[in-house]
Amino acid sequence: MSRSRPATGIGSRLIAGISFLLFSGIASADYALNFQTPVTPIAESVLKLHNMIMTICFVIFVLVFGVMFYSIAVHRKSRGHKASKFDDNPKLEVLWTIIPFLILIGLAIPSTATLIKMDDTSNSDLTVKITGHQWKWEYEYPEQGIDFISALSTPRDQIENKAKKDKNYLLEVDNPLVIPVNKKVRFVITSGDVIHSWWVPALGQKKDAIPGYINEIWTRVEKPGTYRGQCAELCGKDHGFMPIVVKAVSEDEFNKWANQQKGKMVAQAAAVGKTWTKADLMKNGEKVYQKNCAACHQANGLGVPGVFPPIATGHPFSASDAMVKDLTERGFYKDGKIAEGTVDQHIDIVVNGIPGTAMAAFGKQLGAADIASVITFERNSFGNSTGDVIQPSQVKAHQR
């Protein structure tokens, strides 16, 4: 008896330590290694399911390893014990078959109920179409006639370690998704290029965005606030720069925001017919370039040799084989200069992109005024001095 006490003491302390670690995590949903605090019924169901399964796993762990370590310590050969000769016990075999079966049934019932609840998108109050693009999200509200792009807003200086990083580093966007609280919102999710994944942990939402395929999920946020997530699928070079921000507001605030968005869209439509000055195009074009183009072509227009071609004049053209092939077939860059070719070809590439490469088609992501601005900026910056002034009406003719 005296030799078994130390082993029992160590086992008790080990079990107590593991219990503390597991239950301390279960008790606090705000802990950094645990789930985010749920703000929807689905997220609450997922967290409860997670906690219940972890508790069952913990109990099984303690029982199985407790018996095993007890047997090793107490019934070891040095204490004079001999191995039992029995190898067949029908009652025991029935028990260790039935008990796991009952445990699995017990887990399957609440899990299935949660999955069925997740897929029930019927009777929604609002529908939002979500389209993933490299590397931004497009949100469309068909019933309100609203459509906009949401992109990363973290300054390049922070990304390049030239400035101190903010609290929401790489988790902030220029145009968040806005939804009303206590309303059932249906999300229709797809992709315009590669596979992305729309994931907001606090909402309990994660769904793949697949080109040519539509997925559906829904949410009902009960607490106003700002909730952050990000793309959870490896979708390319800037996968880590594709955050999601959801703002849940009251119904009155949502209606006010929707009216503001409609006003912006009317102003954008009016801008297409307007004749812009070169100064205005250059000013707006620099903003559009830094937001949409600098990640690949760099803020100085020099690109990334062998991957993304330079915009700056005087630098030899160098990019992926697919991009070189496409551009050569278009007869555009034989002299290695990108922003000094014909205006129509330049617009065509920005609007329609280059299939099979990271050069996305911006024709549906940006308005005609923004595309005209950025092309004017590129043709008159980075050492380029074509003097060209591109008007939105010229871009509109290329948008299909």
Image: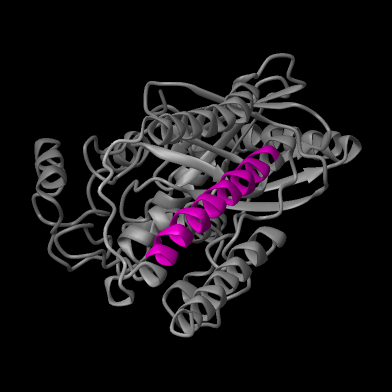
In-image side of 327 versus 74 (left or right): left
Regarding residue 289, the answer to whether it shows in the image is no
Q: Among all residues in the image, which is located at the extreme right?
A: 252
Q: Which of 208 and 33 is in front in this view?
A: 33
Residue 75, position as x, y percentages in the image: 37, 67
In-image side of 49 versus 3 (left or right): right
In-image side of 61 versus 121 (left or right): left
Q: Residue at x 63, y 24 (%)?
A: 113
Q: Does the magenta stretch include residue 121?
A: no
Q: Which of 257 and 284 is in front in this view?
A: 257
Q: Does the magenta stretch include residue 68?
A: yes
Residue 372, position as x, y percentages in the image: 46, 44
Please determine whether, in this image, residue 170 is positioned above or below residue 221: below
Q: Which colour style is shown?
A: one colour
In-image side of 1 versus 293 (left or right): right
Regarding residue 57, the answer to whether it shows in the image is yes
Magenta part of the chain = 45-71
Q: Which residue is drawn at 40% across and 60% down?
A: 68
Q: Residue at x 66, y 58 (%)?
A: 26
